[in-house]
Amino acid sequence: MLALLQDEPGAKAVEAAVGDGAAISAVNLSEVLAKMADAGADVNAAADLIVSLFVEIVPFGIESARGSARIPSRVPGPACRSATVPVSGWHEHEG
């Protein structure tokens, strides 16, 4: 999402995914909102806009944390790792 908002490499892929009904993790959403707040955006308006783009906001519980931890450390930061955890497995053990 940050790539799309900041017109960075990967923005086209994010735009296509959003158009196809993508989901976003709660962790990734919080990172995006924090970056937007740092840039002076209204957090409530930003949240409403981002939520309107996604089919689902996916919770990030213990099973997601375990899956994210297994991703090699060359992927920077926990929010970046959480964005790479397959959505299909996120609901299996979340509570």
Image (spheres, rainbow, N blue to C red):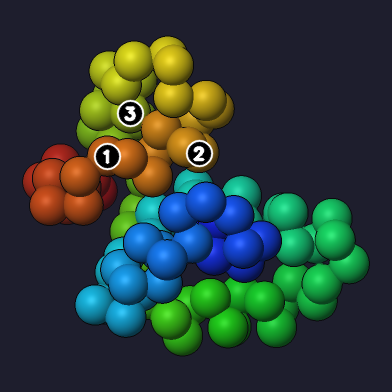
Q: Where is residue 60 in the image (x, y as percent from the top left)?
A: 37, 45
Q: Where is residue 6 in the image (x, y as percent from the top left)?
A: 66, 61
Please report whichever mark, 2 or 3, sits nearer to the chain's N-terminal start: 3
Q: What element carries label 1?
A: loop
Residue type of the residue flagged with mark 2: Ala
Inspect this view and state whether residue 55 appears.
Answer: no
Q: Which residue is drawn at 54% across and 27% down?
A: 77
Badge number at residue 68:
3
In the image, is 85 to the left or to the right of 88? right
Real-space Cα separation, disc 1 to disc 3, in angstroms? 6 Å
Q: Which residue is drawn at 30% across and 68% down?
A: 17
Residue type of the residue flagged with mark 3: Ser
Q: Where is residue 26 in the image (x, y as percent from the top left)?
A: 45, 55
Do the residues bearing badges 1 and 3 touch, measured as CB atoms within 8 Å? yes
Do the residues bearing badges 2 and 1 touch, measured as CB atoms within 8 Å? no
Do the residues bearing badges 2 and 3 touch, measured as CB atoms within 8 Å? no
Q: Residues within 10 Å of mark 3 (few under 14, many from 20)?
A: many
> Closest to the observer: 31 or 8?
8
Please report whichever mark, 1 or 3, sits nearer to the chain's N-terminal start: 3
Real-space Cα separation, disc 2 to disc 1, in angstroms? 10 Å
> Mark 1 = which residue?
85
> Mark 2 = which residue?
79
Q: What element carries label 2?
A: helix
Relative to 18, say whether 94 is above or below: above
